[in-house]
């Protein structure tokens, strides 16, 4: 872990030399969604046009992943057609319901191109294949290839998306970061409600959860908004007075926005949202007229410390001159290129840029797309929608299957009491499968015990769901279970699992910032996943004290109650201006006998 991330928490920014985004303007070998074969694909973008100084090649096609190259699909035989359909099913499975077809490209990546007639016939065949598997196709873009031929030859990039069945729509979580008053909630209101803002924050009113948020115009809690895309890539939102259930039913891809607080006094809520809700991506919103101000740099540092891929949206461009917007873009590019970040900014100005940005962003962690838009005039808003529509998941089907084979583990992030339903918990299923009626144990309690409970019903994105799979977020109804026995940071696990709980643990940390020296006895608030608790420094191995930028293995002790932790889990701690990151390296586990698991599962503890 690079100690230079500390520069983002208050250090000065050093401009980096050399332009970085120019090589990314070409298509580049789009990586299979989420990692399958991504090493093969991580190469600089190459132009589709066969210029003399730029050979017309893409990286060779990978056997796994959701990218398929096809030279042509003109009048295939019935046997060949069935083979092509089977191949499409495999690609869709790899991309969890999405696949990208490059028509006019050989398997070795050579950009040959097709005539207009051949391309028309190939797209017709592709449409037949998609219908056979219950999918729709959308042409993302077409490019002409400068080849030694009198007939114009084209390459077409096509998105194939499966119509959802059995509630298994693709769901991506995007955390929304940025300074206070940068326009985060307004942008989400415009995206999800389908109506532009009036310039005075009307679009954000439906997102606020508390009266004081409406009165002040500032988000202080974590709220969730959904944006759907159907199998044809069209936006499905509340614009037609749809309910959340209707949006889920009509969508084959869902973007769940996690709206976080921008004000510094709500920083602990923002950190909890980033660590607990496991976002796939982060969207950093920067106001064009104020630039990088307030908590912007800190939020950027948090996303980098937790290794959450992020893209940037510059809002309120309608309030500024073109020169002001350009100055903000250059300011961001300078910070992104500095050694602590080492990112390659990619400014999105067209639909073609948005497609390239989505594919490059998913395959390379160093690329950072930048959008400039307005929630009032709607300028460039469609480019962000194109980007979100194409953005592939980070995990492929194989990784998803491996997680589902493990024992059930559900992180408790929110706790509610719903009339006529009882106690309800919200969170994310880290591993395994959770079904209605399943018996689990929840803990640890303040005295380190685990209590037995039953899952009565499941809701995912506000619609009923019978089965929850690893990586999905949902709310679980627990019936008459006593709410006072629950708290944020608990886990619900399979009774067969032997959960490891501890009060004392060790972590390898980097001290990002501290005003003086970090010593034994210092108290900090520790964030590990959904766990948030004050811990005291028991020992610093090999040193008496730490200063800003230094590394060490530190022993922490929770001051209130034991927690469920895993070795290797990312850790973030803070206290005032003091901040640090690291990962858990060792646990002083409390054994099953000590933590009273058998007692807590006895007849007197049943809470059905």
Image: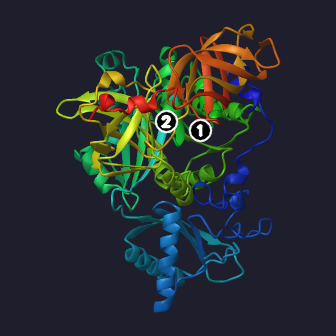
Q: Position of residue 127 (x, y in %)?
A: 42, 76
Quarter of the picture containing the N terminus is top right
Tell me the tag on residue 215. none
Left/right placement of residue 195 relative to residue 92 reads left
User: Which residue was labeled with disc 1?
Assistant: 308
Residue toward you, 605 or 393: 605
Residue 317 in sight: no
Q: Position of residue 81 (x, y in %)?
A: 48, 85
Residue density around tag 1, few if under 14, some if 14–19, many if 20 or more, within 10 Å: many
Query: Residue under circle 2?
Result: 175
- Say above or below: 172 vs 445: below
* Front residue (pair 491, 149): 491
Residue occupying the far left of the picture: 420
Q: Nearer the viewer, residue 114 or 318?
A: 114
Looking at the image, do the residues carrying marks 2 and 1 touch, with CB atoms under 8 Å apart?
yes
Q: Residue at x 37, y 71 (%)?
A: 134
């Amino acid at each position: 872990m690079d100690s230079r991330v500390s520069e983002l928490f208050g250090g000065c920014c050093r401009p980096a030399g050399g332009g970085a985004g120019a090589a990314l303007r070409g298509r580049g070998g789009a990586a299979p969604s989420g990692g399958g074969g991504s090493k093969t694909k991580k190469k600089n973008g190459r132009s589709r046009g066969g210029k003399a100084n730029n050979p017309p090649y893409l990286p060779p096609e990978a056997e796994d992943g959701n990218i398929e190259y096809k030279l042509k699909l003109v009048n295939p035989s019935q046997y060949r057609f069935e083979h092509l359909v089977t191949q499409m099913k495999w690609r869709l499975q790899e991309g969890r319901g999405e696949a990208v077809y490059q028509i006019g490209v050989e398997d070795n990546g050579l950009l040959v191109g097709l005539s207009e007639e051949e391309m028309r016939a190939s797209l017709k065949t592709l449409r037949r294949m998609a219908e056979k598997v219950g999918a729709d196709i959308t042409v993302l873009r077409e490019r002409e290839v400068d080849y030694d031929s009198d007939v114009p030859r084209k390459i077409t990039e096509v998105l194939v998306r499966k119509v959802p069945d059995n509630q298994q729509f693709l769901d991506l979580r995007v955390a929304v970061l940025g300074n206070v008053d940068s326009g985060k909630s307004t942008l989400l209101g415009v995206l999800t409600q389908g109506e532009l803002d009036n310039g005075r924050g009307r679009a954000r009113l439906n997102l606020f959860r508390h009266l004081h948020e409406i009165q002040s115009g500032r988000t202080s809690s974590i709220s969730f908004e959904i944006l759907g895309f159907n199998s044809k890539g069209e936006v499905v939102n509340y614009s037609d007075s749809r309910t959340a259930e209707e949006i889920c039913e009509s969508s084959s891809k869902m973007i769940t926005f996690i709206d976080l607080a921008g004000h510094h006094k709500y920083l602990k809520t923002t950190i909890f949202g980033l660590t607990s809700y496991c976002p796939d991506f982060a969207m950093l919103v920067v106001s064009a007229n104020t630039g990088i101000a307030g908590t912007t740099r800190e939020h950027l540092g948090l996303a980098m410390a937790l290794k959450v891929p992020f893209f940037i949206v510059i809002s309120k461009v309608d309030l500024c001159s073109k020169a002001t917007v350009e100055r903000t873009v250059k300011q961001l590019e300078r910070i992104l290129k500095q050694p602590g970040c080492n990112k390659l900014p990619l400014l999105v100005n067209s639909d073609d840029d948005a497609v390239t940005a989505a594919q490059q962003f998913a395959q390379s962690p160093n690329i950072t797309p930048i959008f400039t838009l307005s929630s009032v005039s709607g300028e460039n808003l469609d480019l962000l929608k194109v980007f979100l529509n194409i953005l592939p998941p980070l995990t492929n089907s194989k990784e998803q299957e491996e997680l589902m084979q493990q024992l059930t583990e559900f992180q408790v992030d929110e706790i509610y009491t719903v009339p006529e339903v009882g106690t309800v918990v919200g969170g994310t299923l880290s591993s395994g499968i959770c079904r209605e009626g399943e018996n689990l144990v929840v803990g640890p309690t303040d005295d380190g015990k685990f209590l037995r409970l039953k899952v009565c019903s499941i809701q995912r994105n506000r619609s009923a769901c019978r089965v929850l799979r690893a990586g999905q977020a949902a709310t679980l109804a627990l019936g008459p279970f006593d709410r006072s026995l629950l708290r944020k940071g608990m886990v619900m696990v399979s009774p067969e699992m032997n959960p490891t709980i501890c009060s004392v643990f060790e972590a390898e940390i980097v001290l990002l910032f501290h005003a003086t020296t970090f010593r034994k006895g210092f108290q900090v608030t520790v964030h590990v996943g959904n766990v948030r608790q004050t811990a005291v420094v028991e020992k610093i191995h090999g040193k008496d004290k730490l200063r800003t930028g230094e590394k060490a293995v530190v022993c922490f002790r929770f001051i209130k109650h034991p927690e469920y932790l895993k070795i290797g889990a990312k850790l973030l701690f803070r206290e005032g201006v003091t901040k640090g990151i690291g990962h858990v390296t060792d646990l002083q586990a409390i054994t099953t006998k000590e933590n009273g698991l058998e007692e807590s599962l006895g007849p007197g503890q049943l809470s059905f």
